[in-house]
Amino acid sequence: MQNAALSGRDDGKTVTLDPLTYREYIELLLNVFKHLRSYYRSGEDGMETQEEVSMALYASKFLNSVRALRFKFRWSPLYLGQPGVDLKESGFPNFIDIMRLETDLGSRGERLPKLPPLEDLKLMFLNHFMSLPEDPEERQKWEDKNNGYCWQIAERSYLEMLNLRTVFFMFTPGKVFPVLDAEDKLIEERGRRAFHFSWGCYDSDRNRPCVYFMYLEQDTSEPRLDLPDSQGYDPSYFQFLHLIQHIGGRAPDNLMAMAAALDESLDVTLHPKVLKRITFGPLVSPLLYRAHPPEKGSVAERLLPLFSKAQLSESDFVIFFTSEMVTSDRESIPPRRD
């Protein structure tokens, strides 16, 4: 059904979607993040910055999250809940759907053994599909069982997709990378080494994905933050990750407040210099506003008439992203060499 509309309960912010419409919405999100991934992979002369490489990776992870949500909701019974999209300056899934990914990851070990192997499910589905009854009264039972097989196949595929390394969750830490440029020698002369660290999170207030980048220095007297020793990573590395998740796993309006909290809370041997945040949204597409007019004064209200004037398709879109950056109050950035 190509013209299914947004439906369900509308609380003024999040609208629940029926399975048919959600399929179209998922295709829209896949298109959005494929374009974002390409955008960040388009470094000049093939030279990409660490930020561009990381952003392409986060876009790929969010693509995997979107694909996982497609499997989760495409055939699931309605009593298990319907997905939602935030239409108030967002256009992205409700954060509860992103939270469910992590919840389902935690229960995957218990749920997967209860489902037959995927190849067996496909064979069971095929055998059932070929046994379509002629009696109209038996058709409904046949269809219910058919949908049940589809749901089990989708459920198993969904659970197998969930992976901390490849999916964007509410908090998605990246890797610690050493700074490799002309500044190295200057930094080492001051008894420090420098790193880039990034992480992704999902803003539960605005229902938008965010990516953070931090430039920090570490005293050379300490074990390297980016390399495990013979026993594994130093405990300070896990303390660092825990602190980032505790403070940086949210997306407050005031980035300066987050930077100050990180600055004060990090170990005295770690010296944050720069914190940058890129927030994605709002996402505007005519597809999202078939049955629900945009909020008065919103970006969507101003943009939607332009889609019509430009004769764009219903699945075309515009996505905004905001970049913010603050520097540490305690630290100054070393001068660059000309």
Image (cartoon, grey):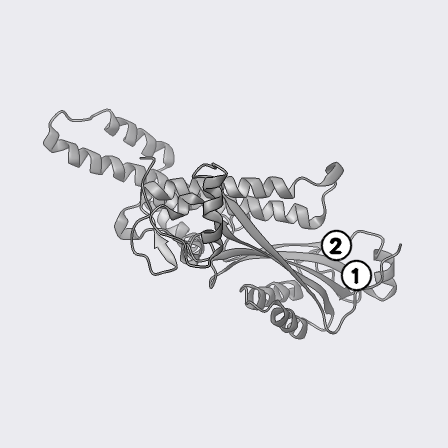
Q: Residue at x 28, y 37 (%)?
A: 149
Which residue was labeled with disc 2? 178
Where residue 99 appears, x then y in whole percent? 43, 57
Q: Which quarter of the figure has residue 227?
A: bottom right
Question: Which secondary structure, mark 2?
Answer: strand
Split into 4 quadrants, where in the image is the N terminus?
top left
> Residue at label 1?
193
Task: Please tell me which residue lies in front, 101 or 253.
Answer: 253
Residue at image location 10% in from the left, 32% down from the top? 137
Marker count (numbered): 2
Is 53 situated above or below 89? above
Answer yes or no: do the residues labelled 2 and 1 have beta carbons within 8 Å? yes
Question: Is residue 156 visible in this depiction of the protein?
Answer: no
132 left or right of 91? Answer: left
> Could you say which is closer to the camera, residue 97 or residue 45?
45
Residue 6 in view here: yes
* In the image, residue 289 above or below residue 44: below
Disc on the earlier residue, 2 or 1: 2
Q: Secondary structure at mark 1?
A: strand
Name the amino acid type tagged 2: Pro
Count neighbours of disc 2 (C-alpha within 10 A) and say few if under 14, some if 14 to 19, many if 20 or more: some
How far separated are the C-alphas under marks 2 and 1? 8 Å
Residue 168 percent across, percent down from the top left: 52, 51
| Percent coordinates x, y for residue 103 in the rendering | 41, 56
